[in-house]
Image (tube, helix red, strand yellow):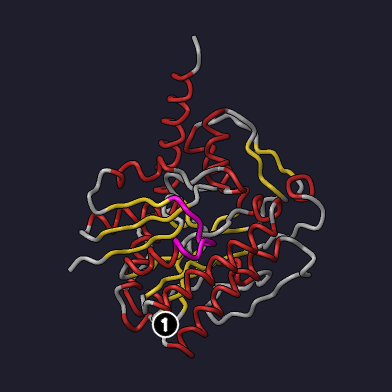
Amino acid sequence: MSRTYLVTGGSGFIGSHLTEALLARGDKVIALDNLSTGRLQNLDRAGSHEGFRFVQGSVLDELIVDELVHECDVVVHLAAAVGVQLLLDQPLRSLTTNIRGSEVVIEAAHRYRRQILIASTSEIYGKNTGGPLSEDADRLLGSPTVARWAYSTAKAVDEILAYTYHRERGLPSVVVRLFNTVGPRQSPAYGMVIPRLVRQAVAGEPMTVFGDGRQTRCFCHVGDVVVGLLALLEEPLAIGDVFNVGSQEEISIFDLAGRIKELTGSDSPVDLVPYEQAYGLGFADMLRRIPDTAKVHSLTGWAPRRTLEDILTEMIAEARTELAVLGDDLPA
């Protein structure tokens, strides 16, 4: 039996892929997005589907959220201010969107007794560079005066709201911590590293790696992430709990740039840019960020299927298509 899903942040990178997957299996989707970072063109495929509706609006608008949650069966809350650059440039907006927006959505889900999945982040773990990081690993944060930690703090509040609404009021909530989701439609804006490096390599521009490049990350394809989200939504035993979703294929950012150069055949130089030059004084980055995904695998059998090379090959093809389109649009 089909259900109606409300996807907040539905025109965003992850939201648009989730929307397509839900529609493809016969569900209906209402996508709510204020288009601050999402793009309507991300929903081009979904737009012609009879089971799809787009609503331009903010998760801070209690009336819109109340109406849409009432109309749906399940809420997937993806709307958030994301990306290192945005969080550093507009920390107040980030806090407001990520805390108050989540509060509005969670309150509405409780009001109408709707199941809700809340997207959290690996930023929860802060400076904890141990690994792989399990869901009960300690959070290690810097000073509250450093804007970098505002996002981690805001998402922690979101998680606490989800847990307490579940324990005290019976809200059927699931929290998912995403680790560096990447893939088609991801914007290079706001500090997203793979889209930026790929576009720089394809365009023959210097490839900018921040810091010394030794920091390591694991990148998971958005298609695999969507499968994980759907698996957790279908699993009753996931309710009231939190799960890491991400890849365990670890690579340093410097080596990532080298891999992209190799796959593109680019002659672009790799430039190391000090953090203070990229983000200002006081910026702190994590040397390592790798998830322990045993919990989600044990419950649902989920594991990512695409390799980093698969991801890079797809994103390089997308970047080349974009560059060709831009070239065609230039005046003769």
- Quarter-of-image position of residue 305: bottom left
Q: Residue at x 50, y 61 (%)?
A: 59
User: Which residues are drawn in magenta?
Assistant: 56-64
Q: Nearer the viewer, residue 81 or 292?
A: 81
- Quarter-of-image position of residue 288: bottom right
Total marks shown come to 1
**Residue named by callout 1:** 171
Left or right relative to 17: residue 182: right
Indicate whether residue 38 is drawn in magenta: no
Left or right relative to 106: residue 72: left
Identity of the residue furthest to the front in this view: 63
Q: Residue at x 55, y 43 (%)?
A: 188
SS state under label 1: loop
Residue 196 locus on image (x, y percent): 57, 41
Identity of the residue furthest to the top in this view: 332
Q: Nearer the viewer, residue 25 or 165?
A: 165
Residue 123 locus on image (x, y percent): 60, 66
